[in-house]
Image (spheres, helix red, strand yellow):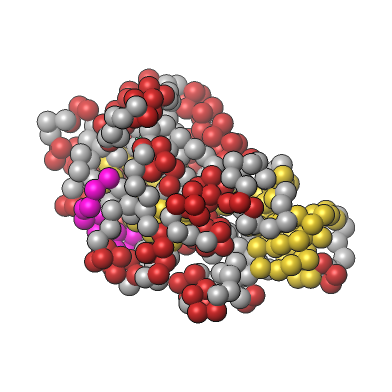
Amino acid sequence: TAITGIATLVTNDPSLGGGSPRSGTFESGGGSPLGLLRDAAVVIDGDRVVWTGASSEVPAADHRVDAAGRTVIPGFVDSHSHLVFAGDRTDEFNARMSGRPYSAGGIRTTVAATRAASDAELEANLTRFLTEALRQGTTTIETKSGYGLTPEDEARALRLAARHTDEVTYLGAHIVAPEYADDPAGYVDLVTGRMLDACAPHARWIDVFCERGAFDGDQARAVLTAGRARGLHPRVHANQLTHGPGVQLAVELDAASADHCTHLTDADVDALANSRTVATLLPGAEFSTRAAWPDARRLLDAGVTVALSTDCNPGSSFTSSVPFCVALAVRDMGMTPDEALWSATAGGAAALRRTDVGRLAPGARADLVLLDAPSHVHLAYRPGVPLVTGVWRRGVRVL
Ligand code: NIG
Ligand code: FE
């Protein structure tokens, strides 16, 4: 298939001048990190991109789609979501919007509803949210357990998730399970013992909510090192509600990502800048908890690789929309539209240590989104407008 007549093609291809904003091209040259092509075409064969270039030079293809002056971008890579759950927390959201603060304790409400749900109900919810995300341009998505908190319920969540995505994360250490309220050390033993045994076969990643009211630095280190010993790679919910040890721990353990990064010291920013650990910002959470925004500008200026994801979950961020997060990041976190789109595509891929997605260059996976707009800037310029009018996943048009 050849998609021709593309007004703006976002490739994230370093050979076309794209590349991580941290590579310096953005700051020094004032150019875009997006590897932009104008009046362009892209050719896909099977599940791969095989050619990008000028629309006038497109090679012959058996099938042609005319983009008619619209924009094509890589599918969004949402590297942080919590989609295996039942119930919702409308009442809690309502209470927050009349002044009550967010607390991690609300997770218990979802744990109770999730444990009570059948496999079929959980999978129906999961597929509903995945479809919702796909319609908004998300072609790669990570999702976590964390609302079961028993070996059986956590393993069930991961098994269900693994039917739908390769990026599955074991988050038994979301909060201390209610049964262990008086024995947090016993719960950490469970998470690193019998629960890990049940969960490791179904997951790629291990995550921990390192936060006051959840797990402290030593507990989080115990969880992540136990997971690593079983072949799971670490990622961390770090520095969301308060300053804490999460970011430093993520860097110490070479975690793929430190997520949230809302409350950072200069030492945290330095540690990230001198590491491979991506800072994943989740503005849906600040939006839905009325918290102060993470400072993306500070991280980018320090040379940190930044990803942008939804954190879709029923408590702190019930949105599956990456375009919404892009708009928030541009409006309130100091990102340019180009940086925000890079972070929501190539940045998400970096946070998952993937090179096959988040870019459109020969050899990359054919995950493409057609936007009804002359350029990608409209994602932030036209907030809340459903611009996604076409989606190809692994070369197959799904929307
Ligand atoms: O990423 N921070 C911890 N976990 C979720 C919130 C989960 C919930 O409130 O249900 C988050 O924001
Ligand atoms: Fe989260």
Q: In the rendered structure, does residue 245 fall within the stretch colored magenta?
A: yes
Q: Which residues are magenta?
A: 241-255
Residue 18 is situated, as x and y percent measured from the top left of the image, at 59, 72
Residue occupying the point 33% across, 54% down? 261
**Does the image show residue 149?**
no
Residue 146 is situated, as x and y percent measured from the top left of the image, at 35, 37
> Which residue is at the far bottom?
28
The C terminus is located in which quarter? Answer: top right
**Does the image show residue 22?**
yes
In this view, the residue in front, 362 or 336, is: 336
Residue occupying the point 51% across, 28% down? 125
Residue occupying the point 61% across, 51% down? 381
The quarter holding residue 290 reads top left
In this view, the residue in front, 12 or 147, is: 12
Q: In the rendered structure, does residue 290 fall within the stretch colored magenta?
A: no
The correct choice, above or below, for 118 with respect to 256 in the image is above
The correct choice, above or below, for 347 with respect to 173 in the image is below
- In the figure, is residue 386 to the left or right of 174? right
- In the figure, is residue 177 to the left or right of 351? left
Residue occupying the point 68% across, 58% down? 375
The correct choice, above or below, for 3 with respect to 198 in the image is below
